[in-house]
Image (spheres, helix red, strand yellow):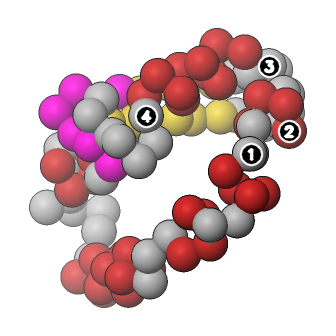
Amino acid sequence: KAPEYTFKDYLTWLDGVNRGSGDMWTEDAYSSFNASERFPELDLPVYFFMGANDYNTPLEAAKKYYQTLVAPSGKKLIIFEESAHTPFLAEP
């Protein structure tokens, strides 16, 4: 419903979603990944768009990283209170 997205954008998104997460759930490199250790500082503007009810990427985990992240160019955490993993669909 967001005017920024075309019908083709939704089809492309669905194509990616239908492929699943695959290796994310089975590879040790993914299950042991720690963003705070790997990327403690980012020298570019950083934006986190989070659904408050997201179980795939829990808000608390994102908040923890956000609080420790050093971002000299700025950082912002935007929380969509009525959304889960797809706030662009739930709260256009």
Closer to the N terminus: mark 3 or mark 4? 4
The residue identified by callout 4 is 58
Closer to the N terminus: mark 3 or mark 2? 2
Pinpoint residue 29: horizontal percent, then vertical percent. Answer: 78, 57
Between 42 and 85, the one nearer to me in the picture: 85
Which amino acid lies under the numbered mark 4 shown in the image of this protein?
Answer: Pro
Give the magenta range. Answer: 79-85
Q: Residue at x 54, y 75 (%)?
A: 22
- Label of residue 38 in the image: 2
Quadrant in the picture for the N terminus = bottom left
Of circles 1 and 3, the one toward us is 1
Q: Secondary structure at mark 3?
A: loop
- Label of residue 33 in the image: 1
User: Is 33 situated above or below 30?
Assistant: above
Residue 62 in the figure: left or right of residue 36:
left
Real-space CA distance between mark 4 and mark 2, rounded to the nearest whole angstrom: 19 Å
